[in-house]
Image (cartoon, helix red, strand yellow):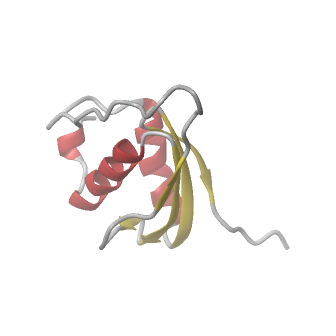
Amino acid sequence: MNYRQLTKKQRRLLQAIHRLNHGTLEGVKIKQGEPMIDGPALGTRTVKLGLGLPEQRHLPHDFRLKRQHLFLISYLRDIQNGKISINVQDGLPIHISHPVRCA
């Protein structure tokens, strides 16, 4: 699957993840399996001291999605509705956190 095949909302989420590069994208709303980022996405950037800021890379207009991207999109469909946080490393989603009912 390629980037251009995603919905506009899914592409916007991947753009925010790519821009953050390292850190956590906080409180992303999910509605009917789609990310709802209407304004600027709020993230917490992680910077390794002594190495400087990482170089900002531009997101290509189209590219083949990596398995982390595909898993994220699939997981959003499974969640359907709610709020998640996404841990990002090297511009890729690596962990998702969200509240769940345990009892």
Spot occupied by residue 86 in the image (x, y as percentages of width and height)? 54, 52
Q: Residue at x 47, y 30 (%)?
A: 52
Q: Based on the displayed image, in which of its 4 quarters is residue 70 positioned?
A: top left
Spot occupied by residue 23 in the image (x, y as percentages of width and height)? 54, 46
Q: Residue furthest front?
A: 50
Spot occupied by residue 4 in the image (x, y as percentages of width and height)? 17, 43
Spot occupied by residue 85 in the image (x, y as percentages of width and height)? 56, 59
Q: Residue at x 23, y 37 (%)?
A: 59
Q: Residue at x 28, y 32 (%)?
A: 57
Q: Residue furthest top?
A: 51
**Quadrant, the N terminus:** top left
Of residues 40 and 8, the one drawn nearer to the viewer in this rendering: 40
**Quadrant, the C terminus:** bottom right
Q: Report whether 63 appears left or right of 44.
A: left
- Does 13 appear above or below 22? below
Numbered circles on residues, count: 0
Of residues 81 and 19, the one drawn nearer to the viewer in this rendering: 19
Q: Residue at x 24, y 56 (%)?
A: 7
Q: Report whether 89 appears left or right of 1.
A: right
Q: Residue furthest left?
A: 61
Q: Report whether 9 appears left or right of 71.
A: left
Of residues 86 and 72, the one drawn nearer to the viewer in this rendering: 86
